[in-house]
Amino acid sequence: MNDSLTSGMRKALDLQKQLHIKEGPPSVQLRKDRLDRCIAMIKKYQEKVIQSIQEDFGNRDPVMSVMTEVESSIGSLNHAKKNITSWVRPTKRRPEVPGLGSLIRLLGAKARIEYQPKGTVGVISPWNFPVNLILAPMAGIFAAGNRAMIKPSEITPHTSLLIKEMFNEFYDEAEVAVFTGDSDLGASFSRLPFDHLIFTGGTEIARHVMRAASENLVPLTLELGGKSPVIVSDTANIKKTASRVMIGKTMNAGQICLAPDYALIPKDKINDFVKESQATISDMYPQIKDNQDYTSIINSKHYERIQSYLEDAKIKGAEVVEINPSEEDFSQQEHHKIPPTLVLNPTDDMKIMQEEIFGPVLPIKSYEELEESVNYINSKERPLGLYYFGDNKEEEEFVLNNTTSGGVTLNDVIWHVGQENLPFGGIGPSGMGSYHGVDGFKEFSHLKSIYKQPSLDLMKLAGFVPPYNKNKEDKTTTS
């Protein structure tokens, strides 16, 4: 890797750290200004953002790009701007020492939490939502009073160069610095002594990032993925369920960390689910191959990876149902499109049940009792999302109480990630830490505990100051 890039990253980090110490915590006014500039930046570059993403994907649904990359980013930034004044206020806590109870409060002791900027936050972003997954964390990073260094994905080079252009226009390097490059640059970036680092991407790469960050004991937020399951209850409306699952599964062609990765459906409902899924896709995408509304797989590597999962499933006995309303030929095409595909009766020895799919392919397993589906989920690594469809409160509570996932959407998929008042994050292999709204502000803040002692000498009053024997004698004499 170019040594000048490495030294340039270190120079930018040193500058930001020096100014963080010299200038101290930024005012609420400055934090709002940084958020405002971010909003103005994405609005100004909206058309270029959509175009650059199109160039990187081959074809990316432009309406979805506006919604997920532009509007949702502005929503997160505006939410932070609106609430920052209340977020930064110190939080009072009840001072209480074991053995003294409320006595110290009566004597005038006080305690509070203050939210202190950490300093410089490193941001390593992925390719699937190459703008939003930078700007959404920036809402919390700026609100908390931090500066940032950004390493966008090399898999979306046009968009990454545009991100650098955008931030260079609206921010000084002392506030935000962007570095573009390959995986070697990413490895060097993750070894820098940031005050916090957020990585969004795959679990295997996260292991390398975590190992590199550990060299400097850098606090981490990891937003990963995994195999997010769908549980379909016997009480679910199959038509509505299939529609919502397939809308979520085909959004960005399934290239979403929260995309439903497999479905668990009552055995006697599977045929109905397949038929309703076919009907939904036919309504949304009468043609697919040259349809601007249907997103391409990002590149040939990922296209071949997904195809290998399907081939492996076929060889091992699964029934593969390709939903191709116009019976188009996908063997010769420019943009690596894969039509929505259902894989029935998958077994655990199939790659499609072992790896996160990240494509428009949905394996479907059958169950007879709901407890079977919960046990199956619990036999796997904890997922980023979990989805339950049904109209049975007792079943719903059973699923919620007996599974662990980053988040849950009931009677739909993915939607919990869009809630600014809910923390977004995983658990274990699906991630650690969370952001969005006030939870993002706290994630990128240092929660400093502050205790103020009253004027009375509490240690002496409690008998905690030597000589202890004399204190005992004094108490005995007094009694």
Image (cartoon, rainbow, N blue to C red):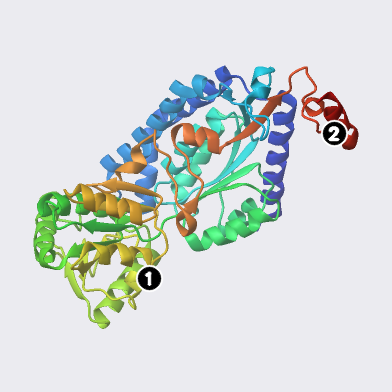
* Direction from residue 19 to residue 466 in the image, left or right: right
Sequence-earlier tag: 1 or 2: 1
Residue found 42% across the figure and 63% down from its top: 381
What residue is pinned by disc 1? 354
Q: Secondary structure at mark 2?
A: helix
Q: Nearer the viewer, residue 330 or 306?
A: 306
Residue 265 lies, in percent from the top left, at: 19, 63
| Residue type for callout 2 | Lys
Q: Total label count?
A: 2
Whether 445 is drawn above or below 51: the answer is: above
Q: Is residue 93 above or below residue 329?
A: above
80 shown above or below 240: above
Residue at mark 2:
472
Coordinates of residue 36 in the picture (x, y in percent) = 48, 23
Helix, strand or loop under label 1: loop
Task: Check disc 2: other Cα within 10 Å, few if <14, some if 14-19, many if 20+.
Answer: few
**The residue under label 1 is which amino acid type?**
Gln
Disc 1 residue crowd, few under 14, some 14–19, many 20+, Cα 10 Å: some
Residue 291: in sight, yes or no?
no
Q: Nearer the viewer, residue 228 or 108?
A: 108
